[in-house]
Every structure is written in structure tokens, then in C-alpha cells.
């Protein structure tokens, strides 16, 4: 039940959670609170994070889309602190959501979607389709900066646009966070209709696919959902790894894939990991995914990062951030020395480059100063310290879960087996190593474990690494064995 979470017996934490719930109910009203929160969620505070436990991803996605602002405001009102909101599936909550509550939720979703289905946003961008409209997506191939790290993926995307019948389907693009996977998918969807206007295309995230499938089941509109998804000439699905550990949705997507592929149509997919490295993904789907072209995007090299920075800088200097009188003048541009400084110090993500340049340009505009290297170094000092590297708990959990063939939700559960124990211990160790969270905070985030459990887990992993011992676990394709340092190196390279 909501409001019963304890922080290792701390009455202060219990009262804090109760205060957040009370403030949230006042923010959104008692009826919405009862339907979406009272028996559907569990709040846990851990330092700068507010973790929201939910019984399923459908509820998580709806709450995130519709109540994030109210939750953040309620937390500030109740605690005076600003927190980052994260979601995790809590199996213990599954039985607490009553049938009447599910019906109420489904009715609200159906009503909202019937009025504006195409306006729904996904976690990684926007949902758009050519069904009945000529909507365009934000990103296009002309603005994609090509380098040695992404040239093959870019050329494959161009081949799909250029050829009437693609030489490969699916095209499966994988790589780390912020490297351009979404850019390529949206670019393909925007470019294909330019050469073939009759193309019926669809772009959405795997999370949206899951949510829409669940709603279709609940509202008995499965056939309509299937017709809309499968009657496409080009289907682009982002974050396909989101299907992991969802067997019924995987089965639905398998039939969708087969229908489109057998009709000679195009499927393009993006993921954080290679198909064979996605845990709890059915062998049938893996075999379909690797039957086309699988290509990886690596982090950009220095010269590519410089070109990306120049492109971002040029675009920013034309925006309202810069006064009209300075646009295009010698005082209204980003010097090459600043471009190189940013490119040298931020290496892991294109989004980090954009964020750093935005901070410099905004500072110069607000202070009415000319951008130079000394100013950039002063402005970015704290930014670079925090961004080198940027690692979030959710990134660590996702990486560890993918490697060991489980799910982030399982890491938070009370289930115990050799694989889950090893995955939890590596997750705790990496969180302590790469974030500023204390052992107690890590324990709270990892399913309300106490700090002694975290310390013991870290000590165990440190011992394995020191001796470079063999570690054993059971993955989706059978038993696995690897050296501890090899496992650690792979996990850290994927963060």
C-alpha cells in the first residue's frame, strides 16, 4: 500500500513519503490520485532520486507522461528538495491493483488516446506516422555528421532511402547512449517519402509499441492495432531492447515483423546492445534481427566531435539565445579554440557536446560577453567535472541487466538465484564506483536493501576482480563463464 515504505525503520523517511503523497493528492485531485497512485505505486526516496515502484510498464509510462511535473512539485513542497524521478517495475505491487482500478485506468487512456493518438510522445523523441497525415520528425539525414565511427550505419541508412527495394531488412543499428541511433531512424523516415511519396511509414519506440499493445488488449481493439502497425511500407522501432522479458509482446512483434518482412517491406531497428546481447529476448526474434544487417555506432573520434560541435555552434548562434545585432558578427560565433576544447574534454556522447556548447553560448548571451577560451573554461569547469563521465543508476542497471540476461526490475526484486545475485552485486559495485551515492542510498534504490548488503556485495566483487576469478551465470542461451576483469571491462565500456 502507498505510504508504508520505511527507510530501515526510520519514521522520518516514512513521514516524508506520506507528505509527498498528501501533496500529490492535493496537486492532481483525489480521484486521479486514487486511480493512478493509491494502490498502484510505491515511493522510495534515495538522496537526489525519487524512485517510483509500479506494477507494470503501462502504468509507469502513463504516470511519467502525465504526472511528472506534479510529482516533482509535490516532492519540493513536502521536502524542499529537487529530485530526479525514476521508475521501476515492482512485482510485489502487481496484486494490489484491483480490477475496478485497471478498468478506470484503461477507460482514461482510451479516452485520451482517441482524442490525440498521434500526439503521444515517446521517451526518446516523438511518435509519428504517415497514416492520414504528412507529419515529419525532428531529425534528418542532412544534419547527421558522418565520421569513421558511424559511416557504415549512415551508408546503410542512405541505401534504404536510395533503393526502391532495400538490400537488407531489417537494418539493426546498435550503440551507446547519445551516438545518433535515433537520428538515423528519424532521418530515414523523413527521407524515404521525399523520393517515394506513396510510402506508408511508421516510427515509434518499443516502449510505445508495448503500451499501445497493452491498451489494445484492455480495450479489445487488438485487430485495429495490428492493421495500423502491419500495413506499413517502412516500420522504424527505436529502443527495441525494451521488449526484453516481455514474452507476450515479443510474440506480437514477431508476427508483426514477419508480416512486414514477408511482404517485402522495410524494418529498421535501434538498440543499446547487439541482438545477441539483449537478455530475455526470444531466439526467434534474435534470429530475425541478425538475418539482416547489424551495424554498431561507436563514440565519435576527435575530428568528428569537432565537426559536430561546429554544426551545433552554428545552429545555436542563429537562435534567440543570441541578440540579432550579434548574429553573424565576429562577436557572435564560437571560436575554433573553444570547439576543440569541448571536443577534447567530452568524448562519450553527442548530447554532452550539445549541452556544453549550449551552456557557453547561453552564458555569453546573458552576460553580453564575447565567447573565448578562457571564458569557456571557467563556465564549463563544473560541467566537465560532472560529465566525466555521466553515469546514472538507471544506465548501470540497464547495462548490467542486459549483460547478464535479466531485467532492471529483477535486480530490485526479492528473487534469489546465482545469476541475479551476481548481477545485483555488480550493479551495486558499479553504482558505488561511478556515482556519489552512499551505500545506504544505493541499498534503498536497489530494492530497499540495507547498507551492509551493499558493502558485502562490493567486497565480493572487489575480491573477484583482485584475483581475476571465474564468474558463472546462466544467460538466455545457457551457462556462461568469464573472468571477473573481463566482465567489469565490458560493463564499464558499455556505460
Image: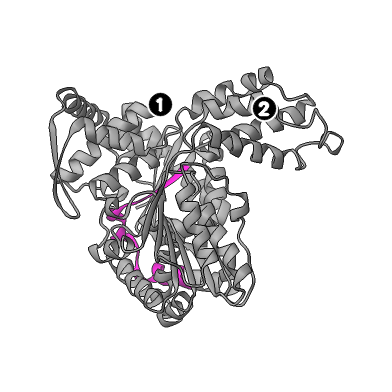
Rendered residue at 30%/50% (across/down): 409
Residue 28 is a magenta residue: no
Q: Which mark is residue 478?
A: none
Dividing the picture into quadrants, the one containing residue 318 is: top right
Dividing the picture into quadrants, the one containing residue 199 is: bottom right
State the residue position of label 1.
436
- SS of the residue under disc 2: helix
Rendered residue at 30%/62% (across/down): 246
* Residue 129 picture location, percent across and down: 56, 69
Q: CA distance from mark 2 to mark 1?
A: 34 Å
Picture layout, residue 222 above or below residue 190: below
Q: Quadrant where the C terminus lies?
A: top left
Tell me, yes or no, if residue 126 can be seen here: no
State the residue lying farthest toward the right: 325
Rendered residue at 78%/32% (across/down): 332
Count residues near mark 2 (Cα–Cα under 10 Å), then give few for <14, some for 14-19, many for 20+.
some
Q: Main secondary structure of the magenta part?
A: helix
Which of marks 1 and 2 precedes in the sequence? 2
483 sits to left or right of 390: left
Rendered residue at 57%/21% (across/down): 381
* Residue 390 picture location, percent across and down: 46, 33
State the residue position of label 2.
336
Magenta region, residue range: 85-107
Amino acid at each position: 500500500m502507498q505510504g508504508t515504505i520505511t527507510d530501515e525503520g526510520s519514521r522520518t523517511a516514512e513521514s516524508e513519503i506520506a507528505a509527498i503523497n498528501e501533496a500529490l493528492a492535493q496537486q492532481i485531485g483525489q480521484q486521479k490520485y486514487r486511480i493512478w497512485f493509491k494502490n498502484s505505486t510505491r515511493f522510495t526516496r534515495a538522496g537526489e532520486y525519487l524512485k517510483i515502484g509500479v506494477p507494470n510498464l503501462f502504468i509507469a509510462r502513463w504516470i511519467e507522461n502525465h504526472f511528472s511535473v506534479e510529482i516533482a512539485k509535490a516532492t519540493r513542497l513536502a521536502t524542499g528538495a529537487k529530485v530526479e524521478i525514476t521508475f521501476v517495475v515492482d512485482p510485489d505491487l502487481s496484486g494490489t491493483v484491483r480490477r475496478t482500478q485497471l478498468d478506470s485506468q484503461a477507460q482514461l487512456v482510451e479516452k485520451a488516446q482517441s482524442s490525440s493518438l498521434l500526439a503521444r510522445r515517446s521517451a526518446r523523441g516523438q511518435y509519428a506516422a504517415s497514416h492520414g497525415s504528412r507529419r515529419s520528425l525532428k531529425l534528418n539525414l542532412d544534419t547527421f555528421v558522418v565520421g569513421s565511427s558511424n559511416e557504415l550505419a549512415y551508408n546503410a541508412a542512405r541505401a534504404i532511402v536510395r533503393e526502391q527495394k532495400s538490400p537488407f531488412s531489417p537494418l539493426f543499428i546498435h550503440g551507446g547512449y547519445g551516438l545518433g541511433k535515433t537520428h538515423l531512424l528519424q532521418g530515414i523516415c523523413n527521407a524515404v517519402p521525399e523520393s517515394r511519396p506513396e510510402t506508408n511509414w511508421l516510427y515509434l519506440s518499443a516502449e510505445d509499441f508495448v503500451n499501445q499493445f497493452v491498451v489494445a488488449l484492455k480495450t479489445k481493439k487488438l485487430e485495429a492495432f495490428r492493421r495500423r502497425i502491419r500495413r506499413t511500407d517502412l516500420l522504424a522501432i527505436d529502443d527495441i531492447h525494451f521488449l526484453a522479458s516481455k514474452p507476450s509482446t515479443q510474440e506480437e512483434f514477431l508476427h508483426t515483423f514477419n508480416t512486414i518482412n514477408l511482404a517485402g517491406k522495410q524494418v529498421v531497428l535501434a538498440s543499446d546492445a547487439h541482438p545477441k546481447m539483449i537478455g530475455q529476448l526470444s531466439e526467434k526474434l534474435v534470429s530475425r534481427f541478425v538475418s539482416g544487417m547489424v551495424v554498431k555506432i561507436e563514440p565519435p573520434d576527435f575530428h568528428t566531435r569537432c565537426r559536430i560541435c561546429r554544426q551545433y555552434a552554428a545552429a545555436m548562434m542563429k537562435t534567440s539565445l543570441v541578440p540579432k545585432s550579434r548574429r553573424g558578427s565576429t562577436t557572435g560565433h564560437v571560436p575554433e579554440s573553444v570547439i576543440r576544447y569541448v571536443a577534447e574534454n567530452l568524448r562519450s556522447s553527442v548530447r554532452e557536446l550539445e549541452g556544453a556548447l549550449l551552456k557557453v553560448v547561453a552564458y555569453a548571451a546573458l552576460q553580453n560577453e564575447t565567447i573565448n577560451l578562457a571564458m569557456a573554461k571557467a563556465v564549463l569547469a563544473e560541467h566537465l567535472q560532472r560529465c566525466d563521465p555521466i553515469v546514472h543508476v538507471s544506465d548501470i542497471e540497464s547495462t548490467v541487466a542486459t549483460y547478464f540476461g535479466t531485467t532492471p526490475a529483477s535486480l530490485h526484486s526479492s528473487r534469489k538465484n546465482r545469476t541475479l545475485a551476481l548481477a545485483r552485486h555488480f550493479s551495486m559495485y558499479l553504482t558505488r564506483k561511478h556515482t556519489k551515492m552512499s551505500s545506504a542510498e544505493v541499498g534503498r534504490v536497489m530494492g530497499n536493501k540495507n547498507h551492509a548488503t551493499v558493502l558485502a556485495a562490493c567486497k565480493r566483487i572487489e575480491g573477484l576482480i583482485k584475483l581475476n576469478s571465474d564468474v558463472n551465470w546462466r544467460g538466455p542461451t545457457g551457462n556462461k563463464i568469464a573472468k571477473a576483469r573481463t566482465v567489469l571491462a565490458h560493463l564499464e565500456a558499455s556505460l
